[in-house]
Every structure is written in C-alpha cells, then in structure tokens.
Amino acid sequence: SEYLNMVEKCMNFACELMDLCRGTQEVEAVLSESDEGTERDPLARLKMAIRYMEKK
C-alpha cells in the first residue's frame, strides 16, 4: 500500500541521515530532538525507537 511505502521511505531516510553524520555531536543532535522540538532529552529519538522496537 502507499502508506507502507511511505513508512519504508521514512525509515530509509532516517538511516541515511545517520550515515551522513560526521561526528558524535551531529549524531547527538539528530537523536536528541524531541517531538515538540523544545525540550532536548539526550537520545530522545533513540529511546523512542527502542520503545517501538524499531531496528534497521
């Protein structure tokens, strides 16, 4: 379905974005953004991925 195709594209984009990080600071910047974008929790995105059992 179109929805599953979009999900796959989003997952691939996230993985490719991580591959482009040039150092620890960039990785932390990508992983620490919260959904609201206001409060920065270190590794918020990583915690969310673990919570939803995402792996790629």
Image: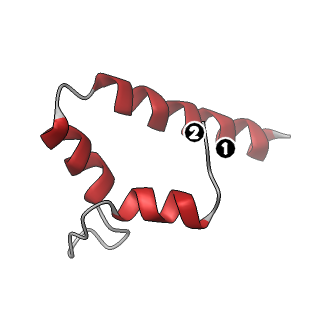
Between marks 2 and 1, how big is the CA–CA gap? 6 Å
Picture coordinates of residue 32, whole percent (x, y): 27, 59
Q: Identify which amino acid the numbered label 1 is placed on.
A: Val
Crowd rating for badge 1 (residues with CA inside 10 Å; few <14, some 14–19, many 20+):
few
Q: Residue at x 62, y 51 (%)?
A: 54
Picture coordinates of residue 12, whole percent (x, y): 55, 31
Q: Residue at x 43, y 26 (%)?
A: 16
Q: Secondary structure at mark 1?
A: helix
| Residue 4 located left or right of residue 53 | right
Picture coordinates of residue 24, whole percent (x, y): 18, 38
| Residue 18 located left or right of residue 26 | right
Q: Secondary structure at mark 2?
A: helix
Determine whether 24 is above or below 19 in the image. below
| Residue 13 located left or right of residue 40 | right
Residue behind mark 1:
7
* Screen quadrant of the N terminus: top right
Q: Which picture quadrant has residue 44?
A: bottom left
Q: Which mark is residue 11?
A: 2
Q: Identify which amino acid the numbered label 2 is placed on.
A: Met
Determine whether 24 is above or below 31 in the image. above
Q: Residue at x 77, y 43 (%)?
A: 4
Q: Which mark is residue 23?
A: none
Q: Residue at x 42, y 56 (%)?
A: 46
* Screen quadrant of the C terminus: top right
